[in-house]
Amino acid sequence: MEPNENSLKQDFISILKDILADHPAIVFDEAERFRAALEGAFAKRKNLPDGDKSRIRTVLNAAILDERAYSKLSSGHAAQGVFTPHGLADEMAAKGFEKAIALDLMLAIEAVARKKMNSGRALVAHKDAAIGDTIQFGSYTWQVLFVNKNDTDFSALIITENIIEQRAYHDRIADITWEKSSLRRYLNTAFVKNFSESDQKRIIEITVRNRDNDLKYITQMRAQKGMIPTVAGGEDTKDKIFLLSIDEVRNLMPNESARAAKYNGNESEWWLRSPGDQENCASHIFRDGFIRYSGGFVGYTTYGLRPVLRLNLV
């Protein structure tokens, strides 16, 4: 039986609106979260025929592109698990739907995505903050990475929405760890004073774990060139303001588009606190959001800062 393109289009747009209403923080390039939200929307729409569910699910899964496919689609700007309206339109056309219907659907999805993105940037009250929300604290706009809301801990881990300044990891190129870096000293002395006394009291000092860089994400070829097998992360620290580590950024910002950030309107690189593949290097994020595990020399002044802190929400 030929698929009913108009019926599929209407069902699809309705499903997307459900996802948007229930998951305002979701982004369209987080494939697994998008799939989970889709299943939740299906569960709410009990009257949706199984055949339509199957077609929608099939087309969605086909439109979630792997790294290789997306590299070709976007001329080398790769990302993993990306859902794209253009990819969906191509998949629709490949499955026999009229190209005009596929393109119309693509435009509808782009409109929903734009609405979602605009709503995702809306500032929320601290007490209502959820993962993915944007809040104002001090003179900066922050993205919520993680939230605890229970009887003993009502706090959020937040990172500045974009790069706030460019600064070296250390005041000179030298073997250094986060513990001894001039950047850590700056963030926990001069920078923290940008906040009012009442706001400073809401910043929770935490123990920051500084793991070694065991180079597990660096290719075997680099290891064969004589790099040392492990670069020391240094002692754990007690900090109010800090930077994300390699493991934290992988877990809390699991794809490239989530990590890409701008400085003065232009995509730019920003520091992580983990060491690079040498003791005088620190890891960082490329302009396109990829993690540079090997890092850059700690004295470089052109990499930016996205400070992180744990905020008491009450």
Image (cartoon, grey):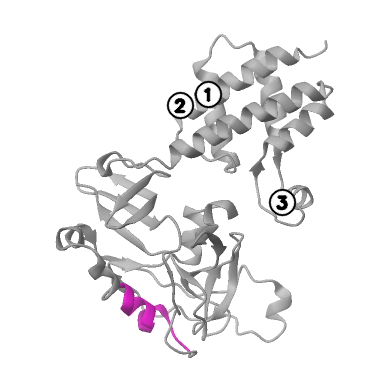
Q: Look at the image and tell me whether residue 255 can be seen.
A: no
Q: Which range of residues does the magenta coloring cover?
A: 175-187
Residue depicted at 57% across the width and 22% down the height: 15
Q: Which quarter of the image is occupied by the N terminus?
A: top right
Q: Is residue 308 left or right of residue 270?
A: left
Residue 81 sits in which quadrant? top right
Residue depicted at 44% across the width and 76% down the height: 167
Nearer to us of marks 1 and 3 is 1
| Viewer-proximal residue among 135 and 176 | 135
- Check disc 3: other Cα within 10 Å, few if <14, some if 14-19, many if 20+: some
Q: Please, what secondary structure does the residue beneath circle 2 have?
A: helix
- Check disc 1: other Cα within 10 Å, few if <14, some if 14-19, many if 20+: some
Q: Is residue 313 left or right of residue 118?
A: left
- What residue is disc 2 on? 21
Q: Look at the image and tell me whether residue 9 can be seen.
A: yes
Q: Earlier in the sequence, mark 1 or mark 3?
A: 1
- Asked if the residue under mark 1 is in contact with the one under mark 2, i.e. CB atoms within 8 Å, the reply is yes
Q: Is residue 115 left or right of residue 208?
A: right
- What residue is disc 3 on? 67
Q: Main secondary structure of the magenta part?
A: helix
Three-letter residue code for mark 1? Lys
Q: Please, what secondary structure does the residue beneath circle 3 have?
A: helix
Three-letter residue code for mark 3? Glu
Q: Which mark is residue 89?
A: none
Q: Distance from label 2 to label 3 (Cα)? A: 29 Å
Residue depicted at 49% across the width and 85% down the height: 299
Q: Distance from label 2 to label 1 (Cα)? A: 6 Å
Q: Please, what secondary structure does the residue beneath circle 1 have?
A: helix
